[in-house]
Image (cartoon, helix red, strand yellow):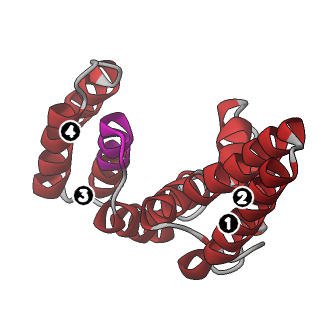
């Protein structure tokens, strides 16, 4: 796993090489090298291991998702701040199956670092509401569900929120 700054240094070096190729008259080589530098810049902002972990999660393959996240040894040095939030969010989704106490900590850490998509924030708060509900903390669960409803602008989680509110009425 490369440090996030190494990716930028490589991109700058490849871009400098591209400029040299333009000066020498090798236009096609220069264009190809600029595209290669663009890939390194893309991977600075969108980590390749997190992308692969999301693809595995989409297939409901939690073991594969954990494997791809395992390649990130030190998230603070390897990832940009938003990517760190998604790293802990994905870890929370995986751990949710086995250890809800650790999942609660991971979701809270992901929310404190920050997630960029509104529906991801809503999903994290919905999971925190479910964890609070399973621990019999009704007031906290209600607060998380109301916050999840505010962040769910497309209405993708309305069924789950409604179902959890119905379950809370039984408690």
Q: Quadrant of the N terminus?
A: bottom right
Determine the secondary structure under disc 3: loop
> Residue at image x 79%, y 53%?
23
Q: Badge 3, how many Cα within 10 Å: few under 14, some, many 20+? A: few
Tag 2–tag 1 contact (CB < 8 Å): yes
Tag 2–tag 4 contact (CB < 8 Å): no
In the image, the segment drawn in magenta is: 116-126
Q: For marks 3 and 1, give the one nearer the viewer.
A: 1
* Distance Cα–Cα, label 3 vs label 2: 57 Å
The label number, if any, that marks residue 15 in the structure image: 2
Determine the secondary structure under disc 1: helix
Q: Which residue is mark 3?
A: 136
Tag 3–tag 1 contact (CB < 8 Å): no
Within the magenta stretch, is there residue 122? yes
Determine the secondary structure under disc 2: helix
Judged by its main secondary structure, the magenta piece is: helix
* Distance Cα–Cα, label 4 vs label 1: 55 Å
Q: Which residue is mark 4?
A: 168
> Residue at image x 73%, y 53%?
37
Q: Which residue is mark 1?
A: 12
Q: Badge 4, how many Cα within 10 Å: few under 14, some, many 20+? A: some
- In this picture, residue 60 sits left or right of residue 104: right
Q: Is residue 170 visible?
A: no
Q: Which quadrant would residue 16 be assigned to in this image?
A: bottom right
């Amino acid at each position: 796993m490369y440090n996030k700054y190494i990716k930028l240094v490589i991109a700058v070096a490849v871009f400098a090489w591209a400029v040299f190729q333009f000066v020498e008259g090798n236009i096609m080589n220069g264009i190809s090298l600029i595209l290669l530098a663009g890939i390194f810049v893309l991977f600075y902002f969108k980590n390749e291991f997190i992308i692969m972990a999301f693809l595995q999660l989409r297939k409901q393959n939690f073991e594969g998702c954990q494997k791809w996240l395992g390649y990130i040894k030190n998230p603070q040095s390897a990832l940009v701040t938003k990517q760190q939030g998604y790293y802990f969010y994905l870890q929370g989704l995986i751990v949710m199956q086995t250890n809800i106490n650790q999942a609660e900590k991971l979701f809270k850490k992901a929310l404190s670092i920050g997630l960029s998509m509104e529906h991801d924030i809503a999903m994290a708060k919905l999971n925190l509401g479910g964890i609070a509900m399973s621990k019999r903390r009704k007031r906290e669960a209600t607060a998380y569900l109301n916050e999840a409803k505010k962040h769910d602008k497309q209405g993708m989680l309305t069924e789950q929120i409604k179902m959890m509110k119905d379950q809370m009425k039984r408690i």
